[in-house]
Image (cartoon, grey):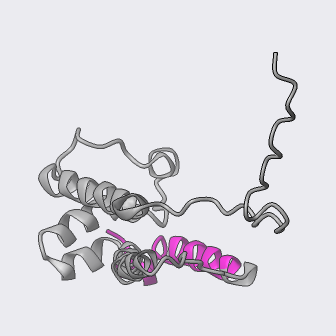
Amino acid sequence: MDASPLPAATPPPDAGAPAAPHRPPRPAGVRRFAAPAGVLAVVVGAFGYVAAVDPGEPGHYPLCPLFRLTGLLCPGCGGLRSAHAFAHGDFVTALGDNALAVTGYVLFAALWPLWLVRTARRRPLRLGVPPRWWWGIGAVLVAFGVVRNLPLGAALAP
């Protein structure tokens, strides 16, 4: 056996450099658009179904539990009829069935493209809504639900 010493291993070029911080890999290509595309697909599918199956005909959708138990309209009552009218381009009827739901449709239509652009620029869409806004949104929902059940708010009832 040959007793010659082994040559010393040469260290890698960056052996003395500090380790780079670990960054999670960014989604490549189309994968990063999965969330906005998935949400849009669900919304389009839901609107497509509601457009095809008229909520005004009995037996297709369950009755609102609050309306069934108390006879009172909740803030969401008329939302399916509103979506049906909206999908058919009848915006006046959609507003009459549930004006608050139409506000939600328009808000989604405004925020979704913003989400898509921010995703394309690799910047997350952060909607920093302070708690007082959530309380305000809750107050609007409660007020809408109360007023549409009063005689003076009959125009807000579906």
* Number of numbered callouts drawn: 0
Q: Can the viewer see residue 78?
A: no
> Is 64 on the left-hand or right-hand side of 90?
right
Quarter of the image with the N terminus is: top right
Report the front residue among 133 and 34.
34
Q: Can the viewer see residue 65?
A: yes
> Is 47 on the left-hand or right-hand side of 30?
left
- Prevailing SS of the magenta stretch: helix
Residue 56 percent location from the top left of the image: 19, 54
Report the front residue among 116 and 137.
116
Quarter of the image with the C terminus is: bottom left
Report the front residue among 49 and 64.
49
Residue 69 falls within the magenta-colored stretch: no
Vertical comparison of 107 with 28: above or below: below
Magenta part of the chain: 134-158
> Is 14 on the left-hand or right-hand side of 119?
right
Residue 79 percent location from the top left of the image: 35, 63
Residue 156 falls within the magenta-colored stretch: yes
Residue 106 percent location from the top left of the image: 34, 81
Q: Residue at x 66, y 81 (%)?
A: 128
Q: Residue at x 67, y 63 (%)?
A: 23
Name the quadrant containing residue 100: bottom left
Report the front residue among 148 and 114.
114
Vertical comparison of 153 with 42: above or below: below
Residue 124 percent location from the top left of the image: 55, 75
Name the quadrant containing residue 35: bottom left
- Furthest toward the top, the residue is 1
